[in-house]
Amino acid sequence: MTLRQIKQAAMKKENDSIDNLFAQLDGQWDLYEPSRGHSGRFLDKQARKKSKPAYMKPLAIAATVVLLFGLFTFYDKGSSRPQQLAEMSKQTRETDSVFTSIIKYEMARMKTKDSELNKPIIQDALVQLKAMDADYDKIKSDLAKGGENKQLIHALVANLKTQISFLDNVLSRLEANEQLNTDKNENVM
């Protein structure tokens, strides 16, 4: 038997098994058509779908521009060493600004949860944040004195990330505390 004959026999066997499958499933197919007006209702539903807010497209473009600018300045190999330090300093300031705004926002959220029940947790959190902020100020002064290096920048970012993580944990604890208190009060009644 030739290779061609073997292939033809194998294909015939596959076709037979497919034919058997279709024969077994005969009468089980969904042959119904949609009701009248289906396409009109579908098109109306598509027209009613809310599109993305108008500010999303410019925001996406701005984010892309910032990302490309950051990548360009970070990977620009042709610039001189002083220019790289100046750009790094600008990037450090931008990073610091972003993290600091997140921390301020989280602190404001934490302060909105102030109640008699949560007061000790919030006061303790503020003491802990004050200690982290003192470390942050020390790192910033080291950056100003000795110039930027990777270790100091990593320490600065790690400190800011730690503060944000700490605030997230405190907020979770405050929300759990409020939920527990609400559940207790619901059970009492």
Image: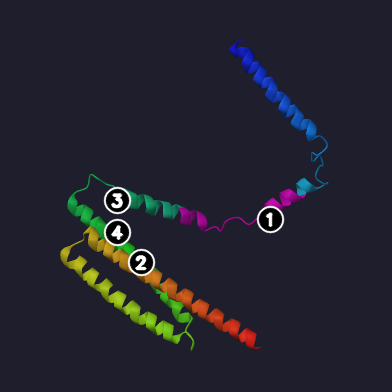
The segment highlighted magenta reads 41-60
- Indicate the secondary structure of the residue bearing disc 2: helix
Q: Position of residue 25 (x, y in %)?
A: 78, 36
- Identify the residue position indicated by label 4 in the image: 91
Query: Which amino acid does the dot numbered 4 rest on?
Result: Gln
Q: Residues within 10 Å of mark 2 (few under 14, many from 20)?
A: some
CB atoms of marks 4 and 3 within 8 Å: yes
- Magenta-highlighted stretch: main secondary structure? helix
- Identify the residue position indicated by label 1 in the image: 48
Q: Residues within 10 Å of mark 1 (few under 14, many from 20)?
A: few
Q: Position of residue 159 (x, y in %)?
A: 31, 68
Compared to residue 100, the image places residue 111 above or below, namely: below
- Identify the residue position indicated by label 2 in the image: 161
Image depth: mark 1 or mark 4 in front:
4
Q: Position of residue 125 (x, y in %)?
A: 38, 80
Compared to residue 47, the image places residue 21 above or below, namely: above
Foreground residue, 164 or 89? 164
Q: Residues within 10 Å of mark 3 (few under 14, many from 20)?
A: some
